[in-house]
Image: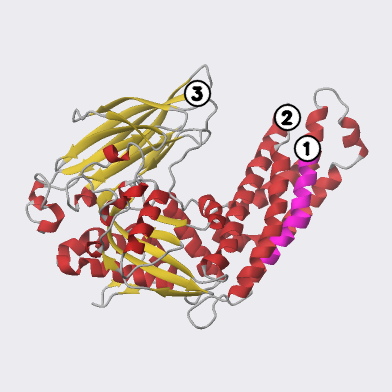
């Protein structure tokens, strides 16, 4: 009983390391080490006696006793060895100046912390694997404790792995091993595209030994050339009438950001003001707002102040209501330039973790993307959820819902989207069936549509949003029974190594369209997840009812 209490205390304290995000983990680790070490050592002492050794030979329950002892020994190793290693890395980050005093980063403590985190991360990964490999217990109380231990140690391991990857990537990303040049896409979700929104302008920034320099932004109208060599089988059908591959503003029609990044890089290299690139970053106004919230407000040249609460609404809608068409791109470019420039200015560990938190949250909703053309960076970016790839895993079952606005307008700001996913059955072969319901409501009123500036609705039929809709079947799974309340029909297209269903949802003012479909996953797959074109807010509008 004493061992159980000590083990539960270890688990509860370890949970504090994963109770929020990486920022919380950094804050909590210092106050958690001593407590976890004391409780783990006490638990280990309790299960090391001769009675526990003899109990391993008891039929049926002996294997449970063995599992408990293995779990306690592993948690004690975590407490006595790995936690101090983690604390050392945290102390390096929090106890050093991360700013070089000249607008850049002091790379030395980051490189040191990266090495320290790598050692701790390797130990923690092995410990989590040992715990997870233990067999399920036959006694309910034992199984409950083991299950909690597996869950918490795995969660801590995932958090530390993310932190390790990001800190290890920073030196190369920031040009420690040679200058890096990146293309920066500014998307606007008011005119929706599969990966987010139409590309309004494109800029660049470079990193050289911790110093960031932001280049000029260029309107999409300044670009010529093409990237049609990046168009795969079936994609000409998905993106017909969208100038996909021949106009840079529509390269985001694809929800596959690595493909978008390759296209952006090709376009950039073809321009007189461009050049080669090491990667592509993409931001929409929702991501810009989150980054401003993490790094500080931005004052534009006209005196307007954008902060962590008003940026998205202004850039998604206010700019079209208040600013002339000729000046609109300037506001997007000026905001993005300042945000990138502010990212690493006056850096400390708190700002670094707040920024990492904001970027990963935004990446999880597809508001922020980053793709590197350096293979050594990709796995870290993928672990952080920043790459915007189409999910090809059969076990992580994902269905895609991606939209492209077909009427040149900024009406998608007014379209509210909500999706409900319900599991409707488990099949004999181990697969599962789900029903998905998506509602799209055009909140634009007839009266407002008659008064908004022409740029918002000038090419729409009476304020109707025209969402070309793509449903990507999950890898190893199927989609069936697609119905739309407006009678829209969906055709089948083979693209991106899967079946894609393509239809057009026209959404008149003050109208809701309901789209429903069924999904059957691969046998043994995890519960179904929705990957979708981001909304115009930080609320993805997805509800899982299982």
Quarter location, residue 288: bottom left
Residue 76 forms part of the magenta stretch: yes
Residue 78 image position (x, y, % from top left)? 74, 52
Write down the residue under mark 2: 137
> Dots 3 and 1: beta carbons under 8 Å?
no
Task: Identify the main secondary structure in magenta.
Answer: helix
> Dots 2 and 1: beta carbons under 8 Å?
yes
Which region of the structure is painted magenta?
70-89
- In the image, which disc is placed on residue 431? 3
313 over 387 or under it: above or below: below
- In the image, which disc is placed on residue 68? 1
Residue 309 image position (x, y, % from top left)? 33, 63
How crowded is the residue under tag 1: few (<14 C-alpha within 10 Å), some, or many (20+)? many
How crowded is the residue under tag 2: few (<14 C-alpha within 10 Å), some, or many (20+)? many
**Mark closest to the chain's N terminus, 2 or 1:** 1
Quarter location, residue 167: bottom right
Quarter location, residue 2: top right
Residue shown at the point (15%, 55%) measured from the top left: 456
**Mark closest to the chain's N terminus, 3 or 1:** 1
* Secondary structure under the numbered disc 2 in the rendered image: loop
Residue shown at the point (40%, 54%) measured from the top left: 262
As measured in the structure, the alpha-carbon distance from the residue carrying label 2 to the one carrying label 1 is 9 Å
Furthest residue toward top: 428
Residue shown at the point (9%, 45%) measured from the top left: 462
- Judge depth for marks 3 and 1 and give the one in front: 3
How crowded is the residue under tag 3: few (<14 C-alpha within 10 Å), some, or many (20+)? some
As measured in the structure, the alpha-carbon distance from the residue carrying label 2 to the one carrying label 3 is 26 Å
């Amino acid at each position: 009983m004493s061992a159980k209490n000590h083990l539960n205390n270890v688990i509860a304290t370890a949970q504090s390391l994963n109770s929020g995000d990486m920022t919380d983990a950094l804050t909590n680790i210092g106050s958690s080490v001593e407590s976890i070490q004391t409780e783990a050592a006490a638990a280990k002492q309790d299960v090391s006696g001769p009675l526990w050794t003899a109990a391993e030979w008891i039929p049926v329950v002996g294997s449970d006793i063995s599992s408990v002892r293995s779990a306690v020994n592993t948690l004690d190793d975590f407490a006595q060895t790995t936690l101090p290693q983690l604390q050392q890395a945290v102390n390096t980050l929090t106890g050093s100046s991360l700013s070089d005093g000249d607008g850049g980063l002091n790379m030395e403590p980051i490189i040191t912390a990266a090495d320290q985190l790598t050692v701790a991360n390797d130990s923690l990964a092995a410990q989590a694997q040992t715990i997870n490999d233990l067999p399920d217990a036959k006694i309910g109380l034992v199984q409950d404790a083991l299950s909690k231990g597996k869950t918490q140690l795995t969660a801590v391991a995932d958090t530390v792995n993310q932190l390790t990857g990001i800190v290890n990537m920073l030196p190369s990303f920031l040009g420690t091993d040679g200058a890096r040049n990146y293309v920066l896409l500014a998307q606007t979700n008011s005119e929706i595209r599969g990966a987010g929104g139409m590309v309004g302008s494109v800029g660049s920034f470079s990193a050289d030994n911790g110093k960031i320099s932001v280049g000029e932004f260029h309107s999409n109208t300044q670009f010529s050339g093409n990237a049609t060599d990046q168009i795969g089988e079936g994609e000409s059908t998905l993106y017909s009438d969208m100038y996909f591959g021949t106009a840079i503003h529509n390269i985001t029609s694809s929800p596959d950001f690595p493909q978008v990044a390759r296209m952006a890089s090709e376009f950039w290299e073809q321009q007189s003001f461009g050049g080669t690139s090491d990667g592509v970053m993409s931001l929409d106004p929702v991501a810009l707002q989150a980054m401003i919230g993490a790094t500080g407000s931005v004052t534009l040249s006209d005196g307007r102040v954008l902060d962590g609460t008003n940026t998205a609404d202004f850039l998604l809608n206010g700019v079209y209501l208040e600013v002339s068409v000729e000046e609109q791109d300037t506001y997007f470019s000026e905001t993005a330039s300042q945000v990138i420039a502010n990212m690493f200015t006056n850096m400390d560990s708190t700002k670094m973790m707040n920024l990492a938190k904001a970027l990963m949250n935004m990446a999880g909703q597809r508001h922020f993307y980053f793709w590197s053309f350096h293979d050594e960076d990709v796995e870290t970016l993928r672990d952080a959820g920043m790459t915007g790839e189409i999910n090809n895993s059969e076990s992580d079952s994902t269905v895609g819902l991606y939209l492209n606005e077909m009427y040149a307008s900024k009406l998608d700001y007014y379209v509210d989207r909500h999706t409900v996913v319900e599991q409707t059955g488990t099949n004999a072969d181990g697969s599962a069936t789900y029903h998905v319901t998506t509602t799209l409501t055009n909140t634009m009123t007839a009266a407002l549509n008659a008064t908004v500036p022409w740029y918002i609705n000038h090419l729409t039929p009476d304020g109707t949003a025209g969402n070309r809709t793509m449903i990507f079947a999950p890898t190893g799974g199927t989609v069936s029974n697609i119905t739309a309340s407006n009678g829209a029909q969906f055709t089948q297209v083979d693209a991106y190594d899967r079946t894609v269903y393509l239809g057009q949802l026209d959404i008149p003012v003050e109208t809701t369209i309901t789209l429903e479909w069924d999904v059957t996953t691969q046998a043994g797959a995890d519960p179904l997840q929705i990957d979708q074109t981001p909304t115009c807010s930080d609320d993805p509008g997805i509800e899982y009812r299982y």
